[in-house]
Image: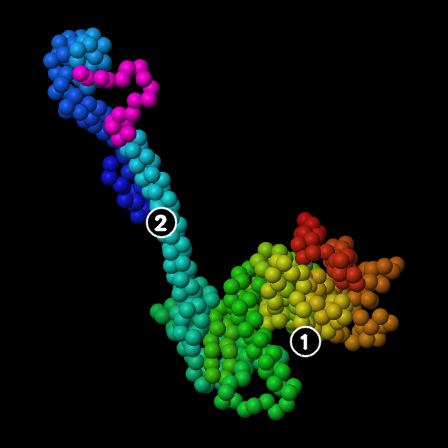
Amino acid sequence: MATVAAAPLPSLLLLLLPLLLFLAPISALHLPAHSLSHRRLASSRHSLRPSFHYAHRRSFVPKRYILAENTTRGVRNNTNTSIALPPASSTNISTPEDHHHRHSHKNRKRNWILGFFSGAIAGVVSGVVLSVLFRLLMNCIRGRYRNPGGPSIYSPKHIKRVEELAFLEKDDGLAALEVIGRGGCGEVFKAHLPPADPAHPEAPGMAIAIKKIMKRTTESAEPTSDEESRMLDRWMRQIRSEIQTVGHIRHRNLLPLLAHVVRPDSHLLIYEFMKNGSLEAALQGVRSGEREMDWAARFKVALGVAAGLEYLHVNHRPAIIHRDLKPANILLDDTMEARISDFGLAKEMPEANTHVTESKVAGTLGYIAPEYGQTLRFTAKCDVYSFGVILAALVVGRMPSDNFFQETEEMSLVKWLRNMIGGENPAAAIDPKLIGNGYEEQMLLVLRIAVFCTAEDPKERPSSKDVRTMLAQIKN
């Protein structure tokens, strides 16, 4: 039997295998009989002819089997014949027909095995090639493999075309924009994308926030001191970390990076504009009487930040440590939903590691865990400590930098709160603007969770998942 070539696809092989297995035995039954040579048939023709015709009349068995059987009988009855054949009952007979049958069976088995493995290998290779092509297609759609000098779009849902960001590539593209903030790495501008509907050009497009990060280039002036050089290097590490981390994260309580534009002198990071600003500005406005923020809104912010922090620590792989969680990095959207932002200091933590060692000071005073100042090791429990300070600020209405705590014996929000919760009147720690709303019991429970999160020993602090679970139980 001819060797069957392996099919390029497993599906074709599976269709042909049943047909081959069905036809192989049938073809074996119709093979010509080669058990006797022509010389033996010629020498015994006269002695076998009567019994052959007699058997042919009595039986429907094929002639070749009767021929072999009657040949044996003829040899026994006629002693004068010269044909010497072994007894029919012998088990050591190996005829050419049996050899051919075994050889065909081996060929079929070998061809089946070769076809099976060839089809399996072809299927695996095809799957790998298709997965690579699909990944390349998705990366091209998301803008990761565009021109390195042009914009990179991470959210095609919000920014559908690169042309929508063409105004940012001009030299004076930011000159006419409104400055809404300044930070350690650069300025933040507010702008609008082109109208989504060309038929209504009067309707402005989506509002975006543009974070400008200055970068060091060969044409720029060299730093005048080692301190300036370290600052520039820190900014470059910060922007690279932010792009690598935020560009691929999607969660309702995390501020996503929409696009990245590279300019000769700076990096431009495009975010969705948050109408209600930061939590820090909101609490300061409440303190000064310019804004109102009831307990329901504050508790909603607490739940949102806890959910976002749980995603970074538990659901995202590898886990991410924010390292600078504070009210200024928590933005509020139109529905007062919290969005954790500013991942410039975020670090991806591999699963095999439990901490990130940093040679430079990270975080903000008042929100940094005490063990970090001694070991410079930032763990997920350090983020939990920072979140505990935010919980305390939401209920107390004061931030750690408030002059009020400088006049107390503890000179610290965390220590002051721990003494107040353990004292005779823990309700005195609640913001007076929230007293009398009927939620005092909930607010005291939140303050106890804040004390739990800011424990001196990091082993005694809960995980971000436990914190989110406790807050959800309070709500229910």
Task: Please name the residue shown 65% across and 71% down the image.
Answer: 328
Label 2 environment density (alpha carbons within 10 Å; few <14, some 14–19, many ≥20) = some
Q: Give the residue at the far right of this rendering.
A: 424
Which residues, given as a range, are shown in magenta?
Answer: 82-101
First in sequence, mark 2 or 1: give its number: 2
Task: Please name the residue shown 44% across and 68% down the image.
Answer: 144
Q: Nearer the viewer, residue 165 or 300?
A: 165
- Can residue 355 be seen by looking at this rendering? yes
Task: Please name the residue shown 12% across and 20% down the image.
Answer: 42
Name the amino acid type tagged 1. Answer: Lys
In magenta segment, residue 84: yes
- Can residue 180 be seen by looking at this rendering? no
Q: Position of residue 53 (x, y in %)?
A: 13, 11
Q: Position of residue 458 (x, y in %)?
A: 75, 61
Query: Magenta: predominant secondary structure element?
Result: loop
Q: Position of residue 178 (x, y in %)?
A: 53, 80
In the image: residue 132, left or right of residue 440: left
In the image: residue 147, left or right of residue 439: left
Q: Secondary structure at mark 2?
A: helix
Residue 30, compared with residue 391, is above or below; it is: above
User: Label 2 belongs to which residue?
Assistant: 122
Viewer-side label of 2, 1: 2
Task: Please name the residue shown 62% across and 71% down the image.
Answer: 345
Q: In terms of image quadrants, where is residue 166?
A: bottom left
User: Label 1 belongs to which residue?
Assistant: 360
Q: In terms of image quadrants, where is residue 134?
A: bottom left
Q: CA distance from mark 2 to mark 1?
A: 52 Å
In magenta segment, residue 6: no
Name the amino acid type tagged 2. Answer: Ala
Q: Position of residue 464 (x, y in %)?
A: 67, 57
Q: Nearer the viewer, residue 166 or 122?
A: 122
Label 1 environment density (alpha carbons within 10 Å; few <14, some 14–19, many ≥20) = few
